[in-house]
Image (cartoon, helix red, strand yellow):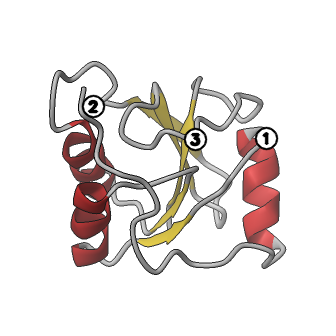
């Protein structure tokens, strides 16, 4: 299983970036092995379609769970179709978000919780 967290940096001590489609990086963690990798978000500098590009990137990376701040309708659609569970309202560091998930304190997002970006 891979858990993906939207982040401002590549490390476990990086801050969670609440903007899924425009975050700088995705930190991917395999809780079974402890492996941590990161990928640059292709949507971070896109002129349009940032959320869709971001969603497609984490689907390709094999993520099964997403921890982030907010997700727009286009991203939500792509992620849901891929079977990725989305948890929103995440704050703090990547490591803290992971611990919150493991403790069962987070609730699955049932629909988009932000509007599509006009940028």
Residue at the image position 72 percent from the left and 73 percent from the top: 106
Q: Is residue 3 above or below residue 7?
A: below
Query: Is 108 on the left or on the right of 48, as rendered?
Result: right
**Which of 115/48 is in front?**
115
- The numbered mark, 1 or 2, whose residue comes first in the sequence reads 2
Query: Is 105 on the left or on the right of 81, as rendered?
Result: right
- The numbered mark, 2 or 3, whose residue comes first in the sequence reads 3
* Viewport quadrant of the C terminus: top left
Residue 103 lies in quadrant: bottom right
Residue at the image position 72 percent from the left and 35 percent from the top: 12
Q: Secondary structure at mark 1?
A: loop
Residue 13 lies in quadrant: top right
Residue 68 pos. (x, y %): 56, 51
Residue 32 pos. (x, y %): 65, 67
Q: Which residue is mark 3?
A: 18
Label 1 Cα neighbours within 10 Å, binned few <14 / some 14-19 / many ≥20: some
């Amino acid at each position: 299983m891979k858990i993906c967290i939207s982040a401002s940096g590549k490390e476990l001590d990086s801050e969670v970036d609440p903007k899924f489609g425009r975050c700088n990086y995705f930190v991917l963690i395999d809780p079974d092995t402890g492996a941590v990798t990161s990928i640059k978000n292709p949507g971070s500098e896109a002129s349009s379609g940032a959320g869709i590009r971001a969603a497609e990137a984490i689907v390709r990376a094999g993520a099964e769970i997403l921890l982030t701040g907010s997700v727009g309708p286009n991203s939500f659609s792509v992620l849901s179709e891929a079977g990725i569970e989305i948890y929103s309202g995440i704050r703090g560091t990547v490591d803290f978000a992971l611990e919150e998930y493991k403790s069962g304190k987070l609730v699955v997002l049932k629909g988009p919780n932000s509007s599509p970006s006009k940028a």
